[in-house]
Image (cartoon, rainbow, N blue to C red):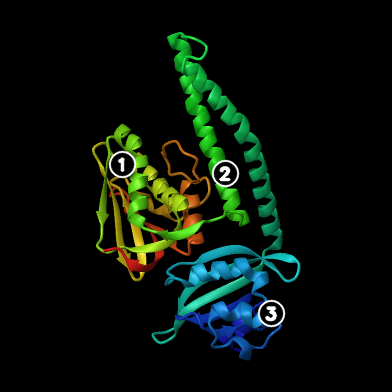
Amino acid sequence: MEKYSAESILRAAPLGVMMTDLDWRVCFASQPLLDTLGITSEVILGEPLLNLPNKLGRADQCKELISVLTQITGHPLSQVITKVVPVHVPEKKFIRVSVSPYKASDTASGYLLLFGDSTAEGEIDEMKNEFISVASHEMRTPMTSIKGSLELLLGGYAGELPAEMTELLGICLTAVDRLIRLINDMLDVAKIESGKMQLHMDRIHVVDCAKRSIRSMKSLAEANHVSILVDEGESIPQVRADRDRLEQIITNLLANAVKYSPAEGIVTVRIHLADGSVRISVIDQGQGIPPDQIGKIFDRFQQLEGAKKGTGLGLTISRALVEQHHGRIWVESAFGKGSKFHFELPAVGPAQG
């Protein structure tokens, strides 16, 4: 029986296959991928991965792909990352990109990229996001009106109300507030996934954003009898970010940490410099995350068993916003020993003294 080498199998694979070294320089591309791109291996071998769209003259047609690759190559990769992104070549299509680290030997290691056509899946997902966006917009206006009317009644607009009616109206107002939060979260997810989320980037001091987020969590923390502390490193550089969205990320992580902390527990927000990035960690003393649920904690509408009330979208939105800022987010947790949510953003100088 004829023997096949790993390289011959890769070259014959119908799926687009590419391999890079640890510096993200292309060292292999399968023939089906080269045929699809309309180039020869000599054009891209040894080139940085991010140069590929320019080599093809398609930078404008592959903006989303370039953005995804920029996010992925910005940090060492430790796990498989899969994204479905649109390209325009010239008609709009969707491709699935899976990137994973590999180690062939002590001297050969790098990253493996698999490319596949995912147009049908991408179009369905796009239609679903458009429906969610339109439906959420249509629901938000009447919900806001209902909220305003309830607040007027509770404020005495129609005169003094019986205690039973006041209690019922209070329950209604709480439910409406929750619905509005869900609608706003769904709109954020739809905007992010459709590429319509606009970020207003500026040079930001993360410590200032963290302290504002902590102040916004004061009532929730007091209601849960939880303390929030800041552990701030020295000379923390600025980051380039959208201030409102950065505060939204920190607030989402804090809200989860406070809700799952025991009474008299402490939530710590740690901010320090790590390998050229500013790392923000939100550390709680809760029960932690079961090992079988860590992998899906950032997925849409995912909540832990026994989870407290919420939309199930906060962590999904946080991950998407961090990635839009060219950062990364992850969680460390041991069941029964609390959780540590970390995210990093590229630092920009000068440092604050």
Quadrant location of the N terminus?
Answer: bottom right
- Tell me which residue sits at (39%, 50%) in the image: 250
Q: Which residue is more in the foreground, 10 or 252? A: 252
Q: Position of residue 282 (x, y in %)?
A: 33, 52
- Image side of residue 298 versus residue 95, left or right: left
Tag 3 residue: 37
How crowded is the residue under tag 1: few (<14 C-alpha within 10 Å), some, or many (20+)?
many
Q: Position of residue 350 (x, y in %)?
A: 34, 68
- Tell me which residue sits at (23%, 38%) in the image: 264
| Amino acid type assigned to the residue bearing label 2 in the image | Met
First in residue order: circle 3 vs circle 2: 3
Q: Position of residue 78 (x, y in %)?
A: 42, 69
Q: Say above or below: 255 vs 98.
A: above
Tag 2 residue: 186
What element does badge 1 sit on?
A: loop
Tag 1 residue: 261
- Tell me which residue sits at (54%, 70%) in the image: 69
How crowded is the residue under tag 3: few (<14 C-alpha within 10 Å), some, or many (20+)?
few
Does the CB distance between marks 1 and 3 fall below 8 Å? no
Q: Position of residue 149 (x, y in %)?
A: 55, 22
Residue 297 visible, this orientation? no
- Image side of residue 112 versus residue 283, left or right: right
| Amino acid type assigned to the residue bearing label 3 in the image | Leu
